[in-house]
Image (spheres, rainbow, N blue to C red):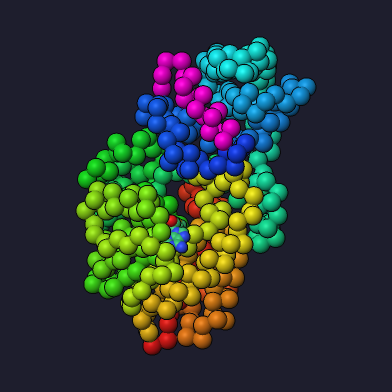
Amino acid sequence: MSDTGVPARRSAVYLLDQILGEGRLMSELVGAGALDRLAAEDRARAQRLAMDTLRGLERADRLLQRHLKKYPPLTVRNALRVGTVELCQEAAAHGVVNAMVELVARHKRFGHLKGLTNAVLRKIADEGPARWAMLRVPRLPKWLRRPLSEAWGAEAIAAIEAAQFAGAPLDLTAKTDAAAVAEMTGGVLLPTGSVRVRDAGQVSTMPGYASGDWWVQDAAAALPVRMLAPRPGEQVLDLCAAPGGKTMQLAAAGADVTAVDASEPRMARLSENLARTGLQARLVIEDARRHQGAYDAILLDAPCSATGTIRRHPDLPYAKDGSEFGALIALQAELIDHAWSVLKPGGRMVFCTCSLLPDEGEVQVEEALARHSDMQVVPGAREQPGVAAEWRSAEGGLRLRPDYWPDLGGMDGFYIACLRKSG
Ligand SMILES: C[S@@+](CC[C@H](N)C(=O)[O-])C[C@H]1O[C@@H](n2cnc3c(N)ncnc32)[C@H](O)[C@@H]1O
């Protein structure tokens, strides 16, 4: 980080302004170059500060409320929030306060609020850390909490929120030898075969990254391909493939993979990932609903609300409001129906989403079964190493939640079902 820490903190505040004020996603902002002018270390630091602040936003606001008669403009409020979260996570108080005061002082319109920033953050430095620990685990915004509570119950939501507040470790999928990857990265081998690394630094400098021995993939996200169980030489279609975590698993298993995705920039990342890992797939940039062919097996990782990934993407509940979910659910059904038309009789398809909403999982499969008389669920596909019986859902799929594996550090929320077409 730069000496003063001001550039990283200023960028963290900018990210928060855009997420909380404009409803933009962190990935969109970073992809559009919001952090390009920072040094690599500052880029990582800015993102970490913004994400930590979003995870702790409710607590930060409660502490700040005590010292503010009225809310300052969003940028200053966000500077106070970042400072509060840092102070309560035991960063050196003088560094944080000085950096935040300097940042506000240099602001073209709000420079006059530097005195307020200084006074408030000094009070937070004195009493904030002790109070922070006594505040409740931050809750999801109501628009998302309500449907999730209806689906999983109050106790589960509290556990899911605790998992989201805790954040996520780094999970890796090995190209060939998971035990060797655990050894080289200092990680632990998880029951399902992924490798988990705690307190990982910069991914690209970790052992085995440049040589393509592994790729980053949450343990839950690694299960759909295990359930599809691709065989060497099989014609496998990976629909909605980018950036390619599952494509690489399919290719590493020896399948003949066609990867389709509508997004050119995301497909460029898939291409880079294949080059780094020395794996091969045929890449097609097109709308999956137009893709033609006849495949032995299909993996459909459909676009969804991504509500299962909030541990890693705490911006999502703030940038979104659920208004686009209806269109996503309709698109998922269209994708299932089209994928089914390019699956050979006797073939199998795994449908999955990184969502916690049953409408994007269990219900989607129940409705697909009603539309397709030649579709059956393959409940046996769930019998994978490390997969617990409690994760099984009634219609034959697998329901994964962030509050599972509490002692191991959780997992992303996912829904997965393996479907067979009558032969
Ligand atoms: C959940 S992500 C896929 C993640 C990927 N399977 C992996 O494991 O890395 C969903 C993808 O669907 C793509 N997508 C959305 N609508 C699409 C469509 N109509 N046709 C093809 N791809 C689409 C998005 O570009 C995005 O890359």
Return the x and y of residue 57 as percentages of the image width and height.
Answer: 63, 35
Residue 311 to residue 342: above or below: above
In the image, 169 versus 191, the foreground residue is 169
Q: State left or right for residue 162 relative to residue 350.
A: right
> What secondary structure predominates along the stretch shown in magenta?
helix
At 34% from the left and 49% from the top, the residue drawn is 269
Return the x and y of residue 294 as percentages of the image width and height.
Answer: 33, 78
Return the x and y of residue 18 as percentages of the image width and height.
Answer: 56, 35
Q: Quadrant of residue 348?
A: bottom left
At 60% from the left and 58% from the top, the residue drawn is 325
Q: State left or right for residue 325 relative to residue 173.
A: right
Q: Quadrant of the C terminus?
A: bottom left
Residue 89 visible here: no
Q: Quadrant of the N terminus?
A: top left
In the image, 191 versus 4, the foreground residue is 4
Which residues make up the magenta segment?
Answer: 1-18
Residue 183 to residue 382: above or below: above
Residue 248 to residue 130: above or below: below
Residue 5 visible here: yes
